[in-house]
Image: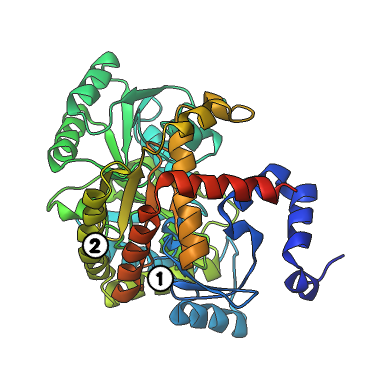
Amino acid sequence: MYTLDDAERFEVGEVHDLYRRYVNKSQVSLMTSFGFGRELVAHAEGAHLTLTDGRRILDVTGGVGVLNHGHNHPRILAVRERFARERRMEVHKTYFSPYLAALGHNLAEVLPGDLSMSFLPNSGAEAVEGAVKLAFKYHNGKRRTVLRADRAFHGKLLGSGGLTGQAQFAFPTIPGIDTFTYNDLASVRRAVATHPGDVYAILIEPFSASTIEACSEEFLRGLRELCDREKIVLIFDEIYTGWGKTGTLFHFMRYPGLLPDVLTTSKSFGGGKSSISAFVAREPVFRKAYDNLGDALLQSTSTTYYGFGEECATALEAVNIAIEDDYPARARAIGAVLEPGLRRLAKEHPDTVARVDGAGALWGVFIDGGPRILDLVAKLAPGGMARDPRFKTKLVTCAVISALYQDHGIFAYYTLNGRNPLIIGPSLITEPADVERTVDALGTVLDEGLGRLVTRFVKQKVASQW
């Protein structure tokens, strides 16, 4: 049996071998395609990673939504160390938790209107499924249809995966799912009319972080009016965009008076250290569904770790940090650097950058083009890659990400959904100078040309297989 000391002494080759044998060998191949999978991280703090060879990397992934607070925020560490030092109780279903009580209160305080009743599972997918389950229960099972957008990411469990608007999810899922076009109110109305009196919930991401698309104010307010008229539970999924990422505490809060019936959150809700999520419901919706002696425990049986002590204590501190340090303002300041910088690069490289889009500290660079030889490379790609209509875009985007990492020590990523943009979504503690350095480095990489970047990337990939 390996010990913790053993694990911390592993070389990267040993880790790769153990992954291949006990985790997923294809994951090793995929991760090492970008360059950063060939090294191990020794230390992470703020917006930076320090590798075992001493190299310092600027992380502009923001932990894919998890690290608004950055890596190992000192206040988050202090709370968790104190919890362990004082031997606080983690979980016991017949004792009440002061941490859960305080966190529920704070969520109600910072959210608008009567969004005040919380449930706290572990992951975003669980929060989504819990929100949909709440909507179904609100209608006492008398309605059977839930609507979701054609462009959406809500998780990869059987239920949340079916609610995700991606064709590659081909598993069994919950019944009654139908689809509307993202940000198209007429499409939603048609979908509702197709199921008269039978739609119990509409699920939407006000800002789709996986495609870098946003719903218009007109669409969201129209959705609210439609749901009020048809008595449909409206669910906003802000698992990624919550806690300041796009420049307001939650993306929907930029529109005064707009309220969902249920809001989901996770990722940076746990301060980068805690696996915790929440769905927060308007009081009348929650109380009708669950606030009776027969149903009071109906939701809590869905997860053993609901309200886990250290997780709630961590989230409690994370929320306070986000409010006290004004994370929405920090995101807007980052956006004030990213937006003009990235738009300038798009103008300077019109044959490479199709467009840029985003909000606050979450921006996508849509890379396309390159020499025609890449079309042949795409056609000759091994396995099922050649059948992927987005393969060329993914290839050139990966080449740019790899060059950013290897040549400039900047760690970015791209999404697997939509048009596969390169994402720059730094933690909200990132300094403006580091954001400026990222824009400058991206410009330098793009100046090399996609042909040269892809050639180098493919050669490195081939070499890594030997």
Say what secondary structure mark 2 lies in.
Answer: helix
Q: Quadrant of residue 367?
A: top left
Give the image location of residue 2, x and y in percent. Answer: 83, 67
Q: Residues within 10 Å of mark 1 (few under 14, many from 20)?
A: many
Q: Residues within 10 Å of mark 2 (few under 14, many from 20)?
A: many
Q: Quick check: 61 left or right of 232?
A: right
Amino acid type for the residue under numbered disc 2? Gly
Give the number of the mark in front: 1 or 2: 2
**Between 23 and 383, the one nearer to me in the picture:** 383
Give the residue at x 41% y 36%. Answer: 371
Residue 129 visible in the displayed image: no
Give the residue at x 51% y 79%. Answer: 77
Q: Quadrant of residue 84?
A: bottom right
Q: Quadrant of residue 17?
A: bottom right
Give the image location of residue 429, x and y in percent. Answer: 36, 73
Eyeballing the image, is 179 above or below 408? above
Q: What is the quadrant of the N terminus in the image?
A: bottom right
Give the image location of residue 306, x and y in percent. Answer: 53, 56
**Between 81 and 102, the one nearer to me in the picture:** 81
How far separated are the C-alphas under marks 1 and 2? 17 Å
Coloring scheme used: rainbow
Give the residue at x 29% y 69%. Answer: 327
**Between 100 and 10, the one nearer to me in the picture:** 10
Residue located beneath label 2 in the image: 335
Eyeballing the image, is 407 above or below 143? below
Residue located beneath label 1 in the image: 69
Amino acid type for the residue under numbered disc 1? His
Say what secondary structure mark 1 lies in.
Answer: loop
Among numbered discs 1 and 2, the one appearing first in the sequence: 1
Q: Name the disc covering residue 421, or none.
A: none
Q: Quick check: 261 left or right of 34?
A: left
